[in-house]
Image: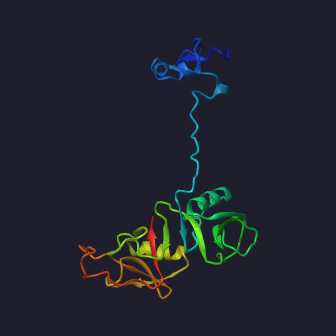
Amino acid sequence: MDKDNNCVAVGSGTSSYRKTVNWCCSEYGISNKHVWGMPQEGGCPTTAAVPISYDGSSAFTNKVWCGANSGRINTAAHCQAAAGKQGYAFGGVGTDPKYLTGCIIEFGKAYFIPLTSTGIMGGATNEFLCDKRPGASYFSGGQCGGSGCGSGGGGIITTEQGCKNAAASYGRSFQSAAGTEWFAGCIIHGGKAYFVPLKAGHTCDKKDAHQSGSNQGYLCMN
């Protein structure tokens, strides 16, 4: 079959139109039961997905390391972009094997620690640049949004199992459920995680629940 003549009528096995691939694979060509027939062409071409460029807009500064499933930044280029959005200079790729993987903050600069690192240390101020990801938990020094009172940096974790999962992701032991006098969600208090269910019907102007804050922060959801 001639390469310039490979628009085939279905069932005929022979080319009947000297048409281009654009005609053959158009809605009109398909509706008229024609296919792009050259075996080496592999049928009508598909449009490849165009990669979305990363500009760092989804990044935030976190006081707790973000793991592989919790928003870790995985390339030096992404770390540099995130640093720019968060107001940090980019210091390059770190080579000290003591550090945790991802994008860390060290003395006001962001460094990318390769994913091959087996270190367990954060930077001097123990800060990281992470990406907010749907369904991923992250640490907040202030109460999560929706926790009963006040503004927050994210949504509360609404189930005990969700709190257990988040605690495990951040190396915290889950202790138990706690009373509704605490801010709602997954709280870190005395080094352990507790789940506080949001009291039904509670709003921020009410003083019937959720008045006490934790002493070590909160685990929130993006």
- Identify the image quadrant of the N terminus: top right
> Total label count?
0
- Identify the image quadrant of the C terminus: bottom left
- Asked which quadrant contains residue 169, the reply is bottom right
Q: From the viewer's perspective, is 80 left or right of 201?
A: right
Q: Is residue 206 above or below residue 23?
A: below
Camera-side residue: 15 or 22? 22
Identify which residue is drawn at 55% across, 21% down.
22
Q: Position of residue 139 (x, y in %)?
A: 50, 73
Q: Is residue 16 above or below residue 215?
A: above
Q: Position of residue 142 (x, y in %)?
A: 44, 76
Q: Position of residue 116 (x, y in %)?
A: 72, 66
Camera-side residue: 113 or 46? 113
Q: Is residue 180 above or below residue 103?
A: below
Camera-side residue: 181 or 192? 181
Colour scheme shown: rainbow
